[in-house]
Amino acid sequence: MATTDDSFNGLTEHCEDCDLDTPHEVSVQLRTESRKEENAQFSREPYRVAECKRCGTRTSQRMNNA
């Protein structure tokens, strides 16, 4: 779970590798899940991507589980 504090951008999360709450850069990416070219435009899903600014570990989570 993300929290805010006095860090540079105000967003810290728990990093499994560091085992600490560290500053993270968080973004949303659209990823194509279909391997078929004709369906690729209909298979994009949003993913939340978080990268630890301390160790560089990246995690992603699919946001739409329909």
Image (cartoon, rainbow, N blue to C red):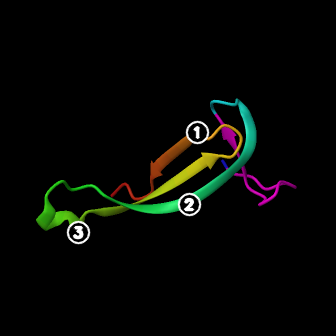
Of the numbered discs 2 and 3, the one sitting upstream in the chain is 2
The residue beneath circle 2 is 27
Residue at 64 percent of width and 55 percent of height: 25
Of the numbered discs 1 and 2, the one sitting upstream in the chain is 2
29 relative to 32 in the view: left or right: right
9 relative to 60 in the view: left or right: right
Rounded to the nearest whole Å, what is the CA distance between mark 1 and mark 2? 14 Å
Residue at 47 percent of width and 49 percent of height: 61
Mark 3, secondary structure of its residue: helix
Kindly identify the amino acid type of the residue bearing the numbered disc 2: Ser
Of the numbered discs 1 and 3, the one sitting upstream in the chain is 3
Judge whether residue 9 is colored magenta: yes
Residue 58 falls in image quadrant: top right
Q: Residue furthest right?
A: 6
Rounded to the nearest whole Å, what is the CA distance between mark 1 and mark 3? 30 Å
Residue 28 is marked as none
Range shown magenta: 2-15
- The answer to whether the residue labelled 1 contacts the one labelled 2, judged by CB atoms less than 8 Å apart, is no
Q: Secondary structure of the magenta portion, mostly?
A: loop
The residue beneath circle 3 is 42
Residue 57 is marked as 1
Mark 1, secondary structure of its residue: loop
- Residue 24 position (above or below residue 10): above
Residue at 71 percent of width and 40 percent of height: 54
Kindly identify the amino acid type of the residue bearing the numbered disc 3: Phe
